């Protein structure tokens, strides 16, 4: 049987990159897929059709994950459309890099709001139906940068480290309700986010990876399938690195 048969999943930020790969892999495993996009409207609409062509129920919602009210409305809409929510993947994220000396307050606030507050917003909304159902899996996208830091990314690293603390706390709070909470920490994955780096920086990253290559979005998506499925039913409060061995 497909690993996510009869499960309803919500993936934030699925118009591009890792989120898109997660939505597609989930559909291949039989899940009903609800997903969000924000600025990439056409790509979001195209994904909805692509998922439906795989033979599953799927719907894209335009929703800003960093907005508390929109997150609440989104979860209510998913419940109205599909009746339940089994798996939440908090994937939406951005970077606004710069050394601390040059980092503006706006750069700091926006990254914390989009990367970290969004996880609070969606998790708070999603755990209501999950608690009623006494079942759920929450998967938060953190980063190796949240574990070890990165020069020029203090805002991003702080947001991703915050996600790890949040993930572990929710695992402790909601384990008794059979709700699991885990994080995935990708290393260097080839998406538009890392495509912004110059060739020298990309080469530097690749050299530091034992597997000697960047990762693909599908390789992160496979880890999400595992954490979203019953295969991981006794795993909670963990950070799974998907980084080619970069950080040991
Ligand atoms: P990406 O290619 O830049 O895609 C980001 C996605 O997030 C887009 O679909 C975007 O949607 C969405 N998004 C951004 N702000 C949003 C908001 N406020 N509300 C809803 N959606 C929003 O990024 P990626 O590389 O796939 O990264 C996905 C996640 O993995 C992020 O959390 C990132 O920090 C994490 N990660 C990535 C890497 C890597 O190497 N790529 C490494 C470690 C961790 P629109 O375009 O529609 O606005």
Image (cartoon, rainbow, N blue to C red):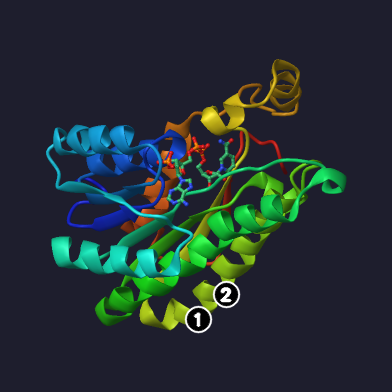
Seen in the image, is 35 located left or right of residue 174? left
Seen in the image, is 213 located left or right of residue 105? left
The answer to whether residue 95 of the structure is visible from this angle is: yes
Seen in the image, is 109 located left or right of residue 94? right
Location of residue 139 with respect to 199 vertically, above or below = below
- Tell me which residue sits at (62%, 33%) in the image: 188
- Tell me which residue sits at (69%, 28%) in the image: 210
Residue 56 picture quarter? top left
Location of residue 47 with respect to 83 vertically, above or below = above
Mark 1 to mark 2: distance in Å? 6 Å
Mark 1 crowd level (few <14, some 14–19, many ≥20, 10 Å Cα)? few
Mark 2 crowd level (few <14, some 14–19, many ≥20, 10 Å Cα)? some
For the residue pair 20 and 155, the one nearer the viewer reads as 155
Seen in the image, is 58 located left or right of residue 126? left
- For the C terminus, the image quarter is top right
x and y percentages locating residue 52 in the rendered image = 15, 38
Label 2 element class: helix
For the residue pair 13 and 66, the one nearer the viewer reads as 66
Residue 230 picture quarter? bottom left
Disc 1 to disc 2: CB gap under 8 Å? yes
Location of residue 219 with respect to 142 vertically, above or below = above
- Tell me which residue sits at (76%, 23%) in the image: 204
For the residue pair 87 and 73, the one nearer the viewer reads as 73
The residue to which callout 2 is attached is 169
Residue 125 picture quarter? bottom left
The residue to which callout 1 is attached is 173
Within 8 Å of ligand 1, the CB of disc 1? Answer: no
Label 1 element class: helix
Which residue of the protein is positioned furthest toward the top in this rendering?
199
x and y percentages locating residue 54 in the rendered image = 16, 34
The answer to whether residue 238 of the structure is visible from this angle is: no
């Amino acid at each position: 049987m497909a690993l996510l048969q009869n499960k309803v999943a919500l993936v934030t930020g699925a118009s591009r990159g890792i989120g898109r790969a997660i939505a597609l892999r989930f559909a291949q495993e039989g899940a009903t897929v609800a997903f969000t996009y924000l600025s990439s409207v056409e790509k979001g609409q195209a994904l909805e059709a692509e998922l439906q062509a795989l033979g599953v129920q799927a719907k894209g919602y335009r929703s800003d994950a960093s907005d508390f009210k929109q997150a609440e409305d989104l979860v209510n809409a998913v419940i109205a459309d599909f009746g339940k929510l089994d798996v939440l993947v908090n994937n939406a994220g951005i970077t606004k890099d710069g050394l601390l000396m040059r980092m503006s307050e706006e750069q700091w606030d926006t990254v914390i709001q989009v990367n970290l507050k969004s996880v609070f917003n969606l998790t708070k909304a999603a755990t209501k139906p999950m608690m009623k159902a006494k079942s759920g899996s929450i998967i938060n996208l953190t980063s190796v940068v949240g574990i070890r830091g990165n020069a020029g990314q203090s805002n991003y690293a702080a947001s991703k480290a915050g996600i790890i603390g949040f993930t572990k706390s929710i695992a402790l709070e909601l384990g008794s309700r059979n709700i699991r909470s885990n994080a995935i920490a990708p290393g260097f994955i080839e998406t538009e986010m890392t495509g912004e780096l110059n060739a020298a920086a990309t080469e530097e990253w690749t050299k530091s990876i034992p597997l000697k290559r960047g990762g693909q979005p599908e390789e992160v998506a496979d880890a999400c399938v595992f954490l979203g499925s019953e295969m991981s039913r006794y795993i909670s409060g963990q950070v799974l690195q998907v980084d080619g061995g970069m950080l040991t």
